[in-house]
């Protein structure tokens, strides 16, 4: 026990140094990116190729996941809706959750797992739409909540800022994914095994960053 206590400061120091190295590396990378954000330094052809490869080609898996997730939200809520006869709140609950939390968080995690790049904000707008489609269909079939009632419920209780919060979070998550994946990719060492470790570290690091950013942005954005 005494040996563990004596070694604890050293272990904490190792962890803190590792965190400082990663934060420092990402900060330096961010600075290098900012210095190249001038139009004449951008390779437009390469930019659009990557947007298509990483963004457009991610749409099928993201859409399928979003649609089923929207349906699952309604299925989980169905017993309480029936118990309290709260059908008039189904549309508001589904759209509020999707716009402010589910949309940006879901697309960030799926996109991080698939490509780890920076097109999250564009895809998040689509996923808000698709998740709500799944929710509307499930609410109509399972709870007999018509699409009109669903949207009336949402329109009465939502405001523009609820949608804006999701867009802001999407951009933030996209930035985290882009910086993390680029940082770990450029810092890869050790041949093929190093590549595998870098990929795992990038996915885990981005996911952790997304959850942390979501936690704090929820407080800041209200």
Image (cartoon, grey):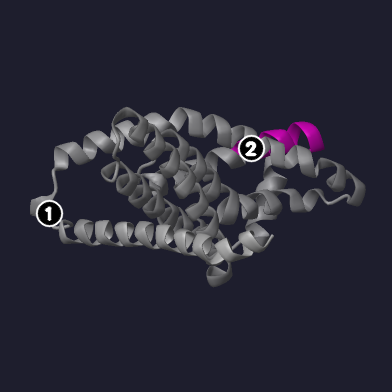
Secondary structure, magenta segment, majority class: helix
Q: Earlier in the sequence, mark 1 or mark 2?
A: 1
Q: Quadrant of the C terminus?
A: bottom right
The quadrant of the picture occupied by the N terminus is bottom right
Give how far apart the Cα atoms at labels 1 and 2 are.
Answer: 39 Å
Residue at point 30% right, 46% down?
A: 182
Residue indicated by mark 2: 69
Q: In screen coordinates, is 3 left or right of 120? A: right
Local crowd at mark 1 within 10 Å, few (<14), some, or many (≥20)? few
- The answer to whether 196 is drawn above or below residue 154 in the figure is above
Q: Tell which residue pokes out farthest to the front in this image.
A: 3
The structure residue drawn at horizontal position 10% and vertical position 51%, both measured from the top left corner, is: 41
Classify 175 as above or below 202: below
What percent of the width, then of the height, locates residue 152? 68, 52
Task: Say which residue appears at 58% left-offset and 70% top-offset.
Answer: 219
- Residue shown at the point (47%, 64%) measured from the top left: 13
- Circle 2 packing at 10 Å, graded few (<14), some (14-19), many (20+), is many
Read off the residue under disc 1: 39
Find numbered disc 2 in the image and state the secondary structure of the residue it sits on: helix
Q: Is residue 26 left or right of residue 82?
A: left
| Label drawn at residue 48 | none
Query: Residue 19: percent from the left, percent from the top?
Result: 43, 60
Magenta residues?
133-144
Q: Is residue 28 left or right of residue 112?
A: left
The answer to which of 216 and 71 lies nearer the viewer is 216
Rendering coords of residue 196 (x, y %) = 39, 32
Q: Is residue 138 magenta?
A: yes
Q: Position of residue 127 (x, y in %)?
A: 51, 41
């Amino acid at each position: 026990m005494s040996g563990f206590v004596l070694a604890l400061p050293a272990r904490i120091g190792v962890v803190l140094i590792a965190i400082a190295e990663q934060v420092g590396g990402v900060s330096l990378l961010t600075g290098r990116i900012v210095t190249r954000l001038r139009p004449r330094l951008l390779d437009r052809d390469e930019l659009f190729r990557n947007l298509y490869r990483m963004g457009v080609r991610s749409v099928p898996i993201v859409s399928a996941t979003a649609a089923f997730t929207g349906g699952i939200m309604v299925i989980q809520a169905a017993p309480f809706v029936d118990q309290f006869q709260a059908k008039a709140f189904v549309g508001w609950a589904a759209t509020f959750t999707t716009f402010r939390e589910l949309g940006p968080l879901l697309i960030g995690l799926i996109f991080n797992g698939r490509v780890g790049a920076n097109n999250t904000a564009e895809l998040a707008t689509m996923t808000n739409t698709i998740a709500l489609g799944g929710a509307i269909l499930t609410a109509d079939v399972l709870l007999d909540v018509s699409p009109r009632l669903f949207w009336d419920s949402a329109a009465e209780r939502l405001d523009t800022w609820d949608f804006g919060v999701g867009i802001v979070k999407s951009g933030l998550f996209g930035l985290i994914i882009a910086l993390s994946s680029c940082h770990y990719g450029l810092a890869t060492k050790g041949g093929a095994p190093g590549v595998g470790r870098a990929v795992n570290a990038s996915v885990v690091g981005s996911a952790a960053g997304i959850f942390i950013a979501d936690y704090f942005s929820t407080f800041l954005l209200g």
